[in-house]
Image (cartoon, helix red, strand yellow):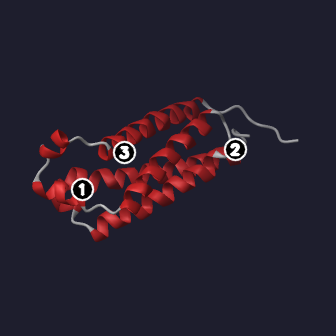
């Protein structure tokens, strides 16, 4: 029989912030996939070209990353150990997709420092943190 400890207040704060973060990432994904012609028209020609040339597998990985992150956040809130492997799937998808964006595209030139470099690095850091935090939470018996 396994015993579970009561999670700390910080656990719940992190779980709620993770949920909010991943809801925002899902909205970002949906905004990109269902972008209207008017929205595309407001982009620079370079941004439009980069978006138009994004491979389907990259868009698919974006979907896997954000929806796995959202599921992982719900599992974290429900105190389920399954959150850890789900966050790992999200992390792997983030790393592959961001690796492609950094090394195979001119994303940083097209979108600038903030959206081309800072935000992608922040996404990687948060994905690593959520995986590591869920793993540690499982070790602390905060999840079943």
Q: Earlier in the sequence, mark 1 or mark 3?
A: 3
Asked whether disc 1 touches disc 3, contact meaning CB atoms under 8 Å apart, the reply is no
Residue 76 in the image: x percent, y percent?
Answer: 60, 38
**x 33%, y 46%: residue:** 33
**Residue at figure coordinates x 54%, y 35% from the top left:** 15
| Mark number, residue 51 | 1
As drawn, is 45 to the left or to the right of 91?
Answer: left
* Distance of label 2 from label 1 (alpha carbons): 43 Å
Quadrant assignment for the C terminus: top right
* Quadrant of the image occupied by residue 56: bottom left
Numbered disc in front, either 2 or 1: 1
Q: Who's the residue at 41% across and 62% down the image? A: 57
Classify residue 81 as left or right of residue 87: right
Q: How many neighbours does mark 1 have within 10 angstroms: few (below 14), some (14-19), or many (20 or more)? A: some
Q: Considering only vertical position in the picture, is 37 above or below 90?
A: above
Q: Nearer the viewer, mark 2 or mark 3?
A: 3
Secondary-structure class at tag 3: helix
In this rendering, would 34 be left or right of 134? left
The answer to which of marks 2 and 1 sits earlier in the sequence is: 1
Numbered label attached to residue 140: 2
Give SS at disc 1: helix
First reached walking from the N terminus: tag 2 or tag 3: 3
Identify the element where label 2 is drawn. Answer: loop
The residue to which callout 3 is attached is 29
Q: How many marks?
A: 3
Pick whichever, 56 or 119, lies toward us. Answer: 56
What separation in Å lies between label 1 and label 3 (alpha carbons)? 12 Å
Q: Which quarter of the image is occupied by the N terminus?
A: top right
How far apart marks 2 and 3 lie (CA) works out to 33 Å
User: Circles 2 and 1: CB distance less than 8 Å?
Assistant: no
């Amino acid at each position: 029989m396994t015993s579970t400890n009561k999670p700390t207040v910080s656990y719940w704060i992190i779980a709620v912030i993770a949920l909010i973060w991943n809801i925002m990432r899902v909205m970002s994904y949906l905004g990109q996939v269902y972008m209207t012609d008017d929205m595309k028209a407001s982009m620079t020609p370079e941004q439009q070209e980069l978006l138009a040339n994004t491979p389907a597998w990259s868009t698919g990985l974006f979907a896997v990353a954000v929806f796995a992150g959202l599921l992982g956040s719900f599992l974290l809130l429900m105190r389920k150990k399954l959150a850890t492997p789900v966050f790992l799937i999200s992390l792997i998808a983030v790393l592959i997709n961001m690796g492609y964006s950094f090394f195979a595209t001119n994303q940083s030139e097209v979108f600038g420092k903030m959206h081309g470099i800072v935000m992608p690095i922040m996404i990687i850091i948060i994905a690593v943190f959520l995986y590591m935090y869920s793993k540690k939470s499982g070790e602390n018996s905060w999840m079943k």
